[in-house]
């Protein structure tokens, strides 16, 4: 007999404020149980030592997980200058020490400016990337080190909250592309300043397109009644508001939901723009994600069935 599905059908997004010391998967499971959802996924792990925004997708919102993994992210972090660790953060054993030079505001600003824009990073050994089928962190824990190819990432913004304090702590804000290792960024900035460093604090401030929206801790959610908890959820369409949109008629909407390609109704100039679009039917009803084809049509990629949500504007957000 088929397995009975546990939990309710819930199509929404929770902007969870992940607590310190908890894995992203554990936080996900707690949120899933709290809302009684049948299906859930998150959009990019945070280390146990990191806190902050972890978008949790319920039900059909899990179709957005891959898209949101590609999104830009913003972090506030603190680095301890003068000390390097094997993991690049406070959990690892100390592997090097160096004096901390006098770093004034002008010197710091000049170094940070060099890191803005496209840069190349060598992924750390303590990361989830795989080498010949094994996670790098597993190899590192076994005392192995392998060659890692540099990867290009983009630093959209990098700012300091003043000069390092008397204890050599440096607090920075970064807005960056997917795939950026903040631990590596802290080490590289310290190296450019003439010293060493490791990460002592990391907080994810937001994930695109949820900048400025409220986050909720597990403790706060647990203290609410069911009605108040439901009001904390964001609609599916909120996770798509950063994408260009296309509107189609009734017939095209039905075809897309049935998995068939349709004629692209946009003007010729707009059709030349690559990338996925958010499709809406009549009356701005959300349909899902579509992708332009080379022959002037739209192909369905991630469609939402039975969802009666409308297009989200920049009006009031749930709080």
Image: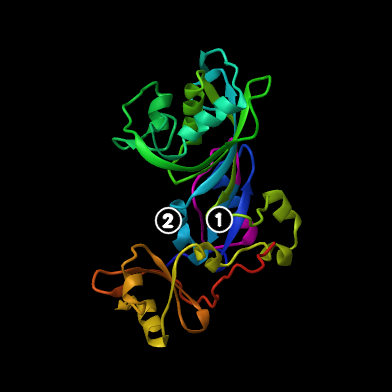
Residue 282, percent from left and from top: 48, 84
Instruction: Name the residue: 73% across, 64% down.
Output: 228
Q: Is residue 241 left or right of residue 259?
A: right
Count of numbered tags: 2
> Which residue in the protein does label 2 denote?
66
Residue 18 seen from this side: yes
- How crowded is the residue under tag 2: few (<14 C-alpha within 10 Å), some, or many (20+)? few
Residue 139 lies left or right of residue 28; in this view the side is left
Residue 56 marker: 1
Residue beneath the point at 44% across and 62% down: 63
Q: In the picture shown, does residue 146 fall above or below 272? A: above
Point out residue 177 in the picture as x, y percentages from the top left corner.
Answer: 45, 46
- Image quadrant in which you'd find residue 279: bottom left
Residue 15 vs residue 26, the one in the foreground: 15
Instruction: Specify how the rendered protein is coloured.
Output: rainbow
Of all residues, the one furthest to the front in this rendering is 106
| Image location (x, y in percent) of residue 62 | 48, 60
Instruction: Specify start and end residues of the magenta stretch as a single range.
Output: 33-52
SS assignment at label 1: strand
């Amino acid at each position: 007999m088929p397995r009975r599905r546990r939990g309710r059908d819930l199509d929404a997004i929770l902007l969870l404020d992940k607590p310190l010391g908890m894995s992203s998967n554990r936080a996900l499971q707690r949120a899933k149980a709290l809302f009684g959802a049948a299906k859930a996924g998150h959009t990019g792990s945070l280390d146990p030592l990191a806190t902050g925004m972890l978008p949790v997708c319920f039900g059909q919102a899990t179709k957005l997980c891959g898209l949101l993994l590609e999104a830009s992210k913003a972090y506030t972090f603190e680095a301890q200058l003068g000390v390097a660790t094997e993991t690049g953060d406070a959990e690892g054993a100390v592997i090097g020490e160096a004096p901390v030079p006098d770093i004034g505001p002008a010197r710091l600003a000049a170094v940070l400016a060099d890191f803005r824009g496209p840069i190349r990073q060598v992924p750390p050994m303590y990361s989830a990337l795989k080498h010949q089928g094994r996670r790098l962190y597993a190899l590192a824990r076994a005392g192995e080190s392998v060659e890692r190819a540099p990867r290009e990432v983009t630093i959209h913004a990098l700012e300091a909250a003043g000069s390092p304090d008397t204890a050599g702590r440096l607090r920075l804000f970064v807005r960056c592309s997917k795939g950026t290792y903040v631990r590596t960024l802290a080490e590289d900035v310290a190296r450019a300043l003439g010293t060493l460093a490791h990460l002592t604090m990391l907080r994810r401030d937001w994930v695109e397109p949820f900048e400025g929206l409220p986050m909720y801790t597990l403790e706060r959610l647990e203290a609410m009644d069911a009605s108040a908890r439901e009001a904390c959820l964001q609609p599916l369409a909120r996770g798509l508001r950063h994408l260009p949109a296309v509107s189609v008629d009734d017939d095209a909407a039905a075809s897309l939901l049935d998995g068939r390609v349709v004629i692209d109704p946009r003007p010729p100039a707009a059709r030349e723009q690559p990338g996925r679009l958010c499709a809406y039917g009549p009356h701005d009803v959300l349909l899902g994600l579509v992708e332009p084809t080379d022959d002037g049509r739209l192909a369905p990629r991630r469609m939402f069935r039975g969802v009666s949500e409308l297009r989200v504007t920049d009006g009031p957000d749930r709080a």
